[in-house]
Amino acid sequence: MTEQLVLSTGEAVLFWVLAPLMVLGALALLFARRPVHIAVSIAGVMVALAVLYIALEAPFLGVAQVVVYTGAVMMLFLFVIMLVGVDSTESLTETLAGQRWIAIVGGLGLVALTIAIVTRATFASPVGLEAANADTNPVGVARLIFGDYVFPFELTAALLITAALGALVLSHRRRLGPKRGQRETVEKKLATFAESGSATAVVSAPGPGVYARTNSADMPALAASGETLDASVTTVLRVRGQVLRDEEAAAQTGRVAMIASGAPVFDTTDEAQLEDETSEIEATATESEGAEGAEGADPAGSDHADRDDAGDSSPETDEGDER
Amino acid sequence: MTLVHYLVLSGILFSIGAVTVLVRRNALVAFMGVELMLNAANLMLVTFARMHGDLHGQVIAFFVMVVAAAEVVIGLAIIVSIHRTRGSASLDDANLLKN
């Protein structure tokens, strides 16, 4: 069998560099946890596919692959993940017994089968697209699309319009009540305020953070009565379990409860605790001059590098004022 | 290194996509598996186009891309609307017809 098409060494190198990367990226579909990671790695797989298309003498399809898949499809996926995916935790309970193992065995069998078929089949000697791409590849593809395939191409237009309309219909939310504008919202708020007399009906929801110790977004605000206000932390952090550590919140709660109990705080604490607190204040002050805050020892603290270092030292002086 | 290597790669990618659809419960992830299967099929079409020196394979791959784009739009809209009504993006939770 005489090979008419000789693949260059460069193409072999390209293939052997890209193919393992693509398989690794695709395996993220099976093993990665977060949908965002999966989407990004699949986008990488699609870029690599585009490169392979160009190597396979299909530059038009390569460009279309980048534009359509990585540019449109995967970005659409990312948008939808942002809409729904943050708390889309995956349940690991099997609803069908043994389904996972059967699927994995079946997948391995499919790999073996396709490889066996592809490697054992005898193909005619590869021709290559030199002749077909004589007038450049896009011209050749266009001749076919607007020649033999005009009718399917026209149908494609109908398909795309139908898809666009379908997306509009599916994501349309029917309005069930009358439209609520700014005026209606205000009137409703004030009506509840008049009824209940509680100020929370009118004011906005509390923001996260406690001025006395930390203002980071993962620290729930404290009510005047001392308990933490869960509503002040964004849902995303709550779902991820990144709300500030319990002991930190508990310390804040206890402190506020002491202050709220009326008497000056120092009068209710004994001398030893006072000593402890002052040394803690000094430690905090020295540590806060370093790169890390007082929570540097806390493993969770590294996640919150955005925390204001000044916020660690200034609260103690505020406390001093209160005392 | 022959064109058969491309076909093997395409088969591996297709199988990974198929197993993903079977194993993962997150609707978005399963949907990405479908996309990977479509792409693997495209790779095979393009490879065969080169093998036979015939651009028809590339044209079919082009149509697959167009249909996949339309399918993604509709599929994601369905996922979003199910998430809106049922509060979940898990494939197991969409069982209204069963119960």
Image (cartoon, helix red, strand yellow):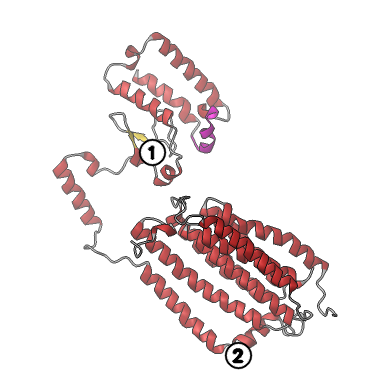
Residue drawn at the location 63% of the way across and 61% of the way down = A108
- Tell me where residue B68 appears, x and y as whole percent: 53, 72
Q: Chain of mark 1?
A: A
On the image, the x and y values in percent for residue A168 come to 38, 71
> Residue visible at 50% across and 31% down?
A309
Image vertical order of residue B44 relative to residue A81, above or below:
below
- As drawn, the residue found furthest toward the front would be A97
Question: Taking A66 as reference, is A13 left or right?
Answer: right
Earlier residue among tags 1 and 2: 2
Q: Going by the picture, which residue comes out furthest to the left?
A: A195
Instruction: Identify the magenta region.
Output: A296-307
- Whether the magenta-drawn stretch holds residue A300 is answered as yes
- Say what amino acid the circle numbered 2 marks: Asp
Question: What amino acid is found at the position of numbered circle 1 in the picture?
Answer: Pro
| Residue at mark 2 | A148
Choose between A133 and B92: the one closer to the eye. Answer: B92
Looking at the image, can residue A51 be seen? no
Majority secondary structure in the magenta region: helix
Identify the image quadrant of the N terminus of chain A.
bottom right
Residue that mark 1 sits on: A208
Residue with the most extreme right position: A2
Image quadrant of residue A124?
Answer: bottom right
Judging from the image, what secondary structure is the residue with disc 1 in? loop
If the image is split into quadrants, where does the C terminus of chain A sit? top left
